[in-house]
Amino acid sequence: MTTTAPTVNGRVVALAHYASRAVLERVLTGYGLTFQQSVALRVVAVADEPVNRDGLVDQVVGFLKVEQADIRAVVEELVSAKLVETDPARPSRVRITDAGREAFTGSAAEVAPVSARIYAGIPAEDLAAAGRVLTLVTERANAELAALK
């Protein structure tokens, strides 16, 4: 029996997202992190210097399309968990702690081989095409969202 692959649409994208996210969340649980916390922690972890707290909130809100209050609470959770801390020299900024760096690098290292297995064998040109299509869909959805505000 031969089945035809569906064309990309919101349902296909959502199913792929939620399946991948479920894998990630299983790993994050072992580090005491939620998905939203991991997104915020990554922003701080990859920064070359302490991150402006309001800028961090805005960036994560932009990624996840959630309320600012929710992400402000997430940042406070990261501070309470001692994964990030206020920069004493610049109190409006946060920086990653050793524990935060360990959680970030550990979870990323644990997810990497799983991601490799998920994407294994998919031709590079298919991945590039999917990347182009999904980037365009994201841009258009962001424009539609902005128009609704």
Image (cartoon, helix red, strand yellow):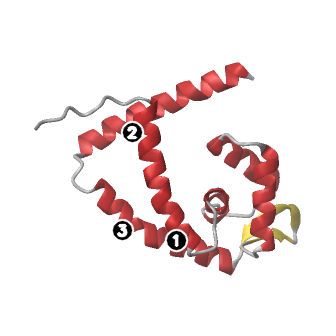
Task: Check disc 3: other Cα within 10 Å, few if <14, some if 14-19, many if 20+.
Answer: few
Q: Amino acid at mark 1?
A: Ser
Crowding around mark 2 (Cα neighbors within 10 Å: few <14, some 14 to 19, many 20+) is few
- Left or right, 67 with respect to 62, comes to right
Q: Are marks 1 and 3 in contact (CB under 8 Å)?
A: no
In front of the other: 102 or 70:
70
Residue on which disc 2 sits? 131
The residue indicated by pointer 1 is 107
Q: Secondary structure at mark 2?
A: helix
Where residue 75 sits, quadrant-wise, is: bottom right
State the CA–CA distance, disc 1 to disc 3: 11 Å
Mark 3: which secondary structure? helix
Work out whether residue 132 or residue 107 is closer to the camera in this orientation and state it. Answer: 107
**Residue 8: x, y in percent?**
36, 31
Question: Residues under labels 1 and 2: Cα distance?
Answer: 24 Å
Q: Is residue 118 placed above or below 67 in the rendered structure?
A: below
Q: Residue at x 77, y 50 (%)?
A: 70
Residue where numbered disc 3 is placed: 113
Q: Name which of mark 1 and mark 2 comes first in the sequence.
A: 1
Q: Residue at the left extreme?
A: 1
Distance (Cα) linking label 2 and label 3: 20 Å
- Give the residue drawn at x 46%, y 31%: 10
Q: Position of residue 67 (x, y in %)?
A: 76, 42
Locate residue 111: give its quadrant: bottom left
Q: Which residue is more in the foreground, 10 or 119?
A: 10
Tell me where residue 23 appears, x and y as whole percent.
45, 61
Nearer to us of marks 1 and 2 is: 1
